[in-house]
């Protein structure tokens, strides 16, 4: 019981500790009832655990069949690049998928609780965060980069960073170096609400976007330097 | 079953104790000779008919055991004994083993050299190479090479990594395909964390046949 209360207290404090927006400050939850970055006990446990990169590399073996050695992902966009992503972001996404807040049927059987522990999630996250991705990523057609740059700088850079570096403390992902087709797919899913654990502010921001604008901004992001 | 976390810890420690391991191996040499003789006696009566004297089974439905990791062979034998891996042919044979036989048998077969087969259907094997190296993105079949490595040797035993992933390269195609079907249907259910059942469930019969043909050639 004491332990539960400690977890609950931490859950309330974590957004402040991590510099994330407190739940009261964000937009009203969408239809799914998802409150941006509301902590689960498992997410807190993984965030508090000290990750070990060597153990993470071993645990990541099971992920290599899709995400490739070195977590470089695939230019087809079927599987994202994870190398260099912030550990906080990776922990959020893995625990959200386990909690059913983000649908990912392809990944479910390989990330579920019977496969890896919260400690292993922390280990994998630290391992991936430390990886560089020297392999070139998939980029878009390059036909509307000026438009993409304009949109990105005006509406995306304040959260994802002017170099696409993201923000570890706020759980905003690095987008630089990501495969274009993956970025585009996720933008579409955030736009449509299918990516259910999205930040509501982002959903609102991109709601007026047409397909061509989403393509332009994804193309621009995919060409940001991978190691800012 | 060991938890994944335990396995990771075991790896972690084993990378830090190479000297101790080498010393232990050196002092174990005479015991190894005795184990070898003990295993050979069992092989020549109980295993040879199906798996061959040197573990290179020539009967396509039976697996080659030569060169598979000691840890993998130990796990399979123990699980035939416990019933976790069910097999009507193996059950009565392992029932006759004594508890001290498993280790020497695993070490014996692991120490043999596997002879790869030859590919009969090149087009099928080429399709299998694609499954092995890339999986199927549309259906979420991971590449076999992710865990079993691009040379199909799995994780070599005795190194910095325990053998979580068995050697596949050179294995009999018919046996491989039967195991994949077993995982797919759940008849074989002794895979750690249900990983192989999840993978095989997503594979088509054609993918199973193709990847088995490709692997049997030795990669």
Image (tube, rainbow, N blue to C red):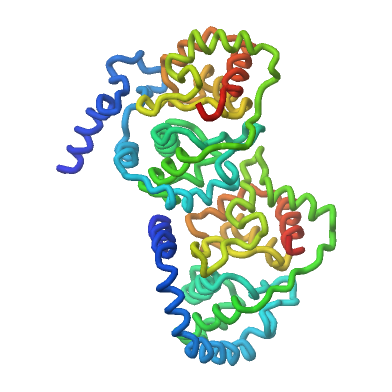
A219 in relation to B168, above or below? above
In the figure, residue B218 lies in which quadrant? bottom right
Question: What residue is rendered at 44% in x and 35% in y?
Answer: A90
Q: Viewer-proximal residue, B15 or B196? A: B15
In the figure, residue A29 lies in which quadrant? top left
A101 in relation to A153, above or below? below
Residue B47: x, y in percent? 63, 84
Residue B89: x, y in percent? 61, 77
Q: Viewer-proximal residue, B44 or A20? A: A20
Answer whether residue A184 is visible to the viewer in this image: no
Quadrant location of the N terminus of chain B? bottom left
Question: What residue is rendered at 41% in x and 22% in y?
Answer: A32
Residue A86: x, y in percent? 43, 33
Residue A16: x, y in percent? 25, 24
Answer whether residue A199 is visible to the viewer in this image: yes
Q: Residue furthest left?
A: A2
Q: Is residue B141 rendered to the left or right of residue B28?
A: right
A126 in relation to B31, above or below? above
């Amino acid at each position: 019981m004491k332990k539960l209360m400690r977890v609950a207290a931490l859950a309330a404090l974590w957004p402040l500790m991590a510099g994330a927006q407190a739940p009261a400050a964000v937009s009203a939850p969408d239809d799914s009832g998802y409150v941006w970055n509301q902590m689960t006990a498992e997410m807190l446990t993984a965030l508090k655990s000290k990750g070990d990169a060597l153990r993470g590399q071993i645990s990541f073996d099971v992920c290599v069949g899709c995400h490739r050695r070195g977590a470089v992902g695939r230019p087809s966009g079927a599987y994202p690049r994870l190398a260099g992503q912030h550990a906080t972001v990776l922990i959020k996404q893995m625990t959200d998928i386990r909690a059913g807040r983000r649908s990912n049927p392809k990944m479910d059987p390989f990330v579920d609780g019977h496969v890896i522990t919260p400690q292993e999630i922390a280990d994998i996250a630290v391992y991936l965060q430390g990886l560089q991705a020297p392999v070139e990523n998939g980029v878009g057609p390059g036909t509307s980069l000026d438009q993409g740059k304009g949109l990105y700088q005006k509406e995306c850079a304040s959260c994802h960073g002017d170099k696409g570096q993201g923000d570890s403390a706020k759980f905003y992902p690095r987008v630089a170096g990501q495969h274009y087709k993956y970025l585009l797919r996720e933008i579409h899913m955030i736009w449509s609400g299918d990516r259910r654990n999205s930040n509501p502010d982002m959903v609102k921001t991109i709601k007026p976007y047409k397909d061509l604008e989403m393509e332009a901004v994804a193309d621009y992001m995919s060409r940001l330097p991978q190691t800012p | 079953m060991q938890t994944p976390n335990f396995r990771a810890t075991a790896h972690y420690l084993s990378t830090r104790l190479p000297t101790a391991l080498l010393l232990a191996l050196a002092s174990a040499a005479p015991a190894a000779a005795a184990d070898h003789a003990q295993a050979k006696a069992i092989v020549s009566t109980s295993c040879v008919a199906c798996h061959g004297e040197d573990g290179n089974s020539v009967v396509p439905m039976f697996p080659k055991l030569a060169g598979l990791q000691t840890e993998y062979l130990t796990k399979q034998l123990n699980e035939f004994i416990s019933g976790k891996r069910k097999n009507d042919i193996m059950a009565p044979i392992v029932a006759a083993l004594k508890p001290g036989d498993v280790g020497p048998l695993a070490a014996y077969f692991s120490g043999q050299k596997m002879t790869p087969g030859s590919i009969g259907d090149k087009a099928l094997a080429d399709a299998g190479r694609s499954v092995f190296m890339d999986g199927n993105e549309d259906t979420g079949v991971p590449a076999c090479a992710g865990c079993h490595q691009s040379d199909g040797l799995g994780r070599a035993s005795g190194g910095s990594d325990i053998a979580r992933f068995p050697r596949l390269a050179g294995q009999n195609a018919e046996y491989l395909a039967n195991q994949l079907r077993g995982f797919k249907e759940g008849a074989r259910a002794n895979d750690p964390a249900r990983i192989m059942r999840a993978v095989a469930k997503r594979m088509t019969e054609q993918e199973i046949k193709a990847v088995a043909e490709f692997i049997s050639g030795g990669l």
